[in-house]
Image (cartoon, helix red, strand yellow):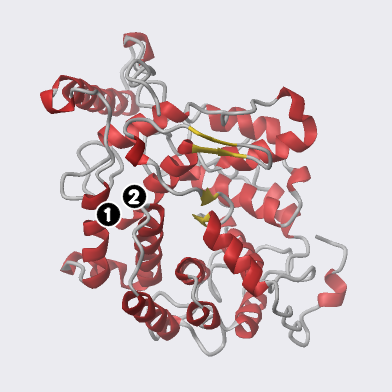
Amino acid sequence: MADDALWCSHVHSGEERVNDGGVATVSSAEQAKVEKNVGAMLSCFLNIGEHDSKEPLLERERHIAYLRRGLKHLPEGFVSLDASRPWLVYWAVHALEVLEARLTEAEASAIVDFLKHCQNPKGGFGGGPGQYSHLAPTYAAVNALVIIGTKEAYDAINRETLQDYLWTVRTEEGSFVMHEGGEVDIRGVYCAVSVARLTNISTQGLFAGTPHWIMRCQSYEGGFSGAPGMEAHGGYTFCGLAALTLLHAHHLCDTPALLRWAVNRQMRFEGGFQGRTNKLVDGCYSFWQGGLFPIMHTLLAQEDAQNLSGEHWMFNQEALQEYLLVCCQHSRGGLIDKPGKGPDFYHTCYTLSGMSVAQHFITTAIHKKCIVGHASNELIPVHALYNVGVEAAVMASQYFNNLPVPPSRPGSCEEEGKGQS
């Protein structure tokens, strides 16, 4: 556990704040506003008498109550997310998993039954019952079922039709459209690779050419864009690096350039991450950016283990936790983007995932904890490539890897794809 002197140590002085050089812009004004709000929350925390220990506390039970309420009933405003219902399930179930709040058998079974109604006869999952299959809710549904981790949950996934569906959204160059007739971007590639690897339906031909398409998305900055020729972005960068790693093609990545880009996304004053250059801090990037570092550490260790830290990721783990604990916990439960925002399942999920990454330095040889604040703040470790608990990922792999890989559908060009990935 971090001692009191370490807490808030990343806020050194006014020198860490934005300096517009006397030329104010819209973005510099917004940055100054966020820094003012964050600074006020830090000062308030340090001056409140009830926190005599000066240790930030994760309001675990408050967040669990918020998530459980949402699983049973959502306000009318959530109708706009009717096409994202498996996402709402995944965000809530994963956040509860990280907080070590187990679902009851009845809750788990009800969720499995709902997600089965989102699965289409021709494969994949839609955003709700009766909706067209889409790679994004397919990823969310598979992850949620893997987290539940019962035989009923595993068997709810029709692996044969899922593999068929992935072939229907694959392009000739190895990229993936999000849905039939939809857009091509790197999210689709990651969702396809992730579900295929988790459920053991991946084949060489299915992802032939995919790593080379992903590499067309690595920008001059070092991060990855949504499609070739666009701007590097935290979420897309995670999707690109994780997919490359799952495809055992990480050697293609310019890892030093990516590392340089990623470390510069952690904000000097706030301690959290921004999504791209010249943007504001956002709690969700705690995972989208923070989750890059365990993956990069593993890749760099394969190249030069002697020159890597043996006990710390290559970002300020304490500063990230301080930002999340002091500035991103909402009084009604749930976590948020930044001070002044409201809570939602999405930010609750990814802030907690990022906090878990910051708390656990895990390699093949060592597991070193870095818990800021009270010892009860510790979360379970997450598997950085999938963003489910490590235990859930291992159990799912053991289950599905004992099942045969479904035969490729006729006309899938599996033979033509051999040796290209």
What amino acid does circle 1 point to? Asp
Residue at the spot of label 1: 344
Dot 1: element: loop
Q: Residue at x 39, y 25 (%)?
A: 2
**Which residue type does callout 2 highlight?**
His
- Please name the residue shown 62% across and 31% down the image: 259
**Mark linked to residue 235:** none
Q: Work out whether residue 249 or residue 236 is closer to the camera in this orientation and state it.
A: 249
Q: Position of residue 368 (x, y in %)?
A: 55, 34
Residue placed farthest to the bottom in the image? Answer: 121
Locate the C terminus and report the quarter of the image it occupies. Answer: bottom right
Residue 129 visible to the viewer: yes
Image vertical order of residue 147 relative to residue 323, above or below: below
In the picture shown, does residue 339 fall above or below 419? above
Rendering coords of residue 361 (x, y %): 55, 36
Q: Which residue is mark 2?
A: 347
| Distance in Å between CA atoms under marks 1 and 2 | 6 Å
Give the position of the N terminus as an image quadrant.
top left
Instruction: Assess whether mark 2 and mark 1 are in contact (beta carbons under 8 angstroms).
Output: yes
